[in-house]
Amino acid sequence: MGSGQTVAVFGAYGHTGRFVVAELRERGFVPVLSGRDAYKLKALAHETGLDARPASVDDPVSLDRALAGAAAVINCAGPFATTAAPVIEAALRTGIPYLDVAAEIEANVDTFAHFADRARDAGAVIVPAMAFFGGFGDLLVTAAMGEWTAADEAHIAYGLSGWHPTAGTRTSGAVSRQRRDGGRVRYSNGRLEHRYDTPPTLQWPFPEPMGPRPVIGEFTMADVVTVPSHLSVPEVCTYMTVEAARDIAAPDTPTPAAVDERGRSDQTFLVDVVVRSGGTERRAVAHGQDIYAVTAPLVVEALDRILTGRTHAVGVASAGKIFDAPDFLRALSPHITVELPA
């Protein structure tokens, strides 16, 4: 448990940030609220009784002040193309671990490219994409592979009942589209490729209770950065149920609405992972409720393992590389049901 350790949360007042703050407190940590909007921080501090430290990514002194005395920092503030590098720099200056919940493919590529050498040389820990998209898929793929060190293909199919995006998701998506000039990306032949055609639609055989559903193929998520960062898999493809893809594409889809005391929406998910090597196939399946809410136990479990030394690597590392994937997934059992290969 957190044992009263202080953890800075940048973007604490955002939709996901609030879930992270609540999860930290539940696990015995003391969150320090930070972010760019002083008014929202003040309101959240009044609501929670926690310390608030406004900071701007354009002001390194304010970031250092926000992280002072913290055991680690969790960045929940998108777009991460703007926030990740400055907050990582502050974490390196302060000498504390950095985690974020970035789903932006380009921002995660930047983190690995720009900070890998420095973080490794400093013995620092930087874990990007420690969220539903990126970290969770990587953990499932890693667990499914077991003792395999390489595979021919990894397929990650997201069966979402629907997708009511937050304002932050829309903003981050717009930044990514701008960076890729309106196109899309896929991971094939061991590298990221930019495409400008229409992605395929196909049927994916989700297990029960979802069953077979039409999905958008090559609906590329951050898993195409995290999985190949440490596993030899030349083909990594992610899929999204057609209903969820339509929701997030529609400009009038409302934001998530709470339906329980934890603030979760009624969205459900089933993630189906298939890895193939030669003629052998292995599968891992997970299901739960609310992709934004479930990011909180994911990133806080990661934080706890880092602070207690239950890690396999230093430097910039994805979830599947730095943690014992099967053990990590089993630890999420109060929030997520997981079925792994024997």
Image (tube, rainbow, N blue to C red):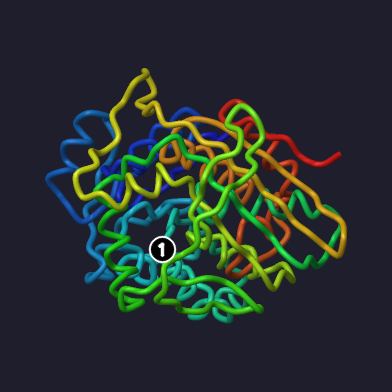
Viewed as shown, does residue 265 lie left or right of 316?
left
* Mark 1 Cα-neighbour bin, 10 Å: few <14, some 14–19, many ≥20: many
Q: Residue at x 28, y 40 (%)?
A: 51
Query: Where, by quadrant of the figure, is residue 264 drawn?
Result: top left
Going by the picture, which residue comes out furthest to the left?
A: 39
Q: Is residue 175 above or below residue 22?
A: below
Between residues 15 and 125, which one lies in front from this camera angle? 15
Between residues 181 and 243, which one lies in front from this camera angle? 243
Quarter of the figure with the N terminus: top right
Kindly identify the amino acid type of the residue bearing the numbered disc 1: Glu
Q: How many marks?
A: 1
- Whether residue 24 is visible, yes or no, is no
Between residues 23 and 166, which one lies in front from this camera angle? 166
Viewed as shown, does residue 44 lie left or right of 216?
left
The picture places residue 308, in percent across and down from the top left corner, at 65, 46
Query: Where, by quadrant of the figure, is residue 197 drawn?
Result: bottom left
Query: Where, by quadrant of the figure, is residue 239 drawn?
Result: bottom right
The picture places residue 38, in percent across and down from the top left corner, at 15, 49
Between residues 266 and 246, which one lies in front from this camera angle? 246
Quarter of the figure with the C terminus: top right
SS state under label 1: loop
The picture places residue 44, in percent across and down from the top left corner, at 22, 36
Q: Residue at x 28, y 70 (%)?
A: 60
The picture places residue 230, in percent across and down from the top left corner, at 69, 68
Label 1 sits on residue? 104
Q: Residue at x 61, y 51 (%)?
A: 306
Q: Residue at x 38, y 66 (%)?
A: 84
- Whether residue 113 is visible, yes or no, is yes
